[in-house]
Image (cartoon, grey):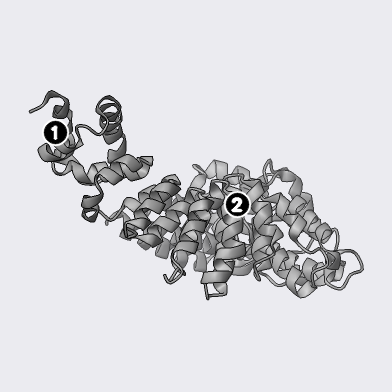
Amino acid sequence: MDADLVPFHSIDRTNDYYMDNDRDQVDRLLTPWLETYGLTRLSRLIETFPNVTLVLLSYAAAHGRMDILKRMHDQFHVTDRLFELAAAKGHLPVLEYLHSVGHHDRLMHAAGMAAAHGHLHVLQFMYETYPDEDKQWWIELSDVGAAAGSGHVDVVAWIFDFWIPAVVPYTDFVDFAVSEALTNATKHDQLAVVHAVASRKLTTHWLGICKFAYEGADVLWDYVDADSHSDSVIHVVIMVVESDNVTSAELEFIFSKFTCLQVGQSGRDNALHESLRRTSNLFRLDCMRWLVERMEASAVSKIFRTGNCGCRASDMTLKEYGVDFVRFLNAHEIAFYQDFMLQVVTSSVEATETWNEWQALRTTRDPSTLLAYCVNKFFDILVGKEGSQVQVMSQCLERLAQAYPPRVDVLRKGYQWCQFMVENDQDRARLRAIERLVFEHASD
């Protein structure tokens, strides 16, 4: 075997096509070899390693090597990836040559690759060159997103201004394409693309624009109509108050952004009411306090009396707030959701190690955390509803018993605490039920 061909043995064994994970290996071999021998040894290489034919064609398309393609013209039939490889690299002369010799397989993939890699001239060539092809699926949503995320403003603009109107018959495709473009552009801080897409005002889903603006693309607020009708704006308000970790500062921004939410405007009262109802359910205390300060006392009281406060909250929510919120809770008569209160108390029972610690928590007059305050407050409310401490504690233990796997040590601890809480025959009957619960899980 000729010495210069020996390194190609590895390609012959492992690489049938010029795939992404093979590309570097092929380039390291072919590029210096071609620099040394030019095209003089191509025939000998193919004769020795026939499988390298496929690699050579793909290499030539990807690198714009017209000389290799022309030399190997009669062997084009062996692969169908040439067009998309050339399109991905933006080699227009290669595409023109391939078209001239009748090779134009996988046009859809080629158009998508050209869009994703920002080759507008390739897209224009393909559109003009193949008028009879069904092009509606040539550029997919993922290609739009890739172009936007890479900052290819000219390609994104052309897709929305020309491609979609000309070849895509589905009107909702525009909304999806806008969403895909904005998602990727904001994710990769491609502000020029964000401006280009938003300024065209293509989407009917303006709430989507507000969503992207709220999630970090602040520049999009410039494209949101501040005078939008309150029936539309209320959906933006709900989106904000329902989002994770919403803050009072974000609420303040939204209420200052839209005209209908200003003091004295028609949409303000409804937006405040809906916001307080939802933030109360989620137990977002900073937002609740901000909203209460801007509402009539009667409207606040009506919401707080529903008994839904905390109905969509987790006990972990309490750890997000400081003890300064105690004064806010004391200032209002709030009917808390029973399951939320039981959840908070149960978590505290599980976390408290000894009876003395529990007693210290129960008797403190100056709680150091909001959680400690709520545990005490909720336990007292539950005792008032259920009739005794044992009844409440038994419900906590029943919840803990449903955990998988149940912590038997916690169940035993709770049973021991209940012995100190017994006050009457009902409590003693409940204590026996707790004893059976502990025994059942201890014997599993």
Q: Residue at x 22, y 32 (%)?
A: 40
Locate residue 314, reporting x and y percent: 57, 57
Horizontal relation, residue 338 to residue 261: left or right: left
Count all numbered tags in the image, as a single digit: 2
Horizontal relation, residue 375 to residue 112: left or right: right
Q: Which residue is mark 1?
A: 9
Q: Could you say whether the residue bearing mark 2 is in a helix, strand or loop?
A: helix
Q: Which residue is mark 2?
A: 154
Q: How far apart are the alpha carbons under marks 1 and 2?
A: 44 Å
- The part of the image, by quadrant, that contains residue 37 is top left
Query: Dot 2: few (<14), some (14–19), or many (≥20) neighbours within 10 Å?
Result: some
Q: Is residue 354 above or below residue 400?
A: above
Type of the residue with mark 2: Asp
Type of the residue with mark 1: His
Locate residue 22, reporting x and y percent: 27, 39
Q: Residue at x 18, y 37 (%)?
A: 11
Which quadrant, please, contains the N terminus?
top left
Q: Residue at x 57, y 48 (%)?
A: 152
Does the image show residue 387? no
Locate residue 107, reporting x and y percent: 38, 61
Horizontal relation, residue 187 to residue 430: left or right: right
Locate residue 193, reporting x and y percent: 63, 51
Give 437 or 104, whichever is nearer the viewer: 104
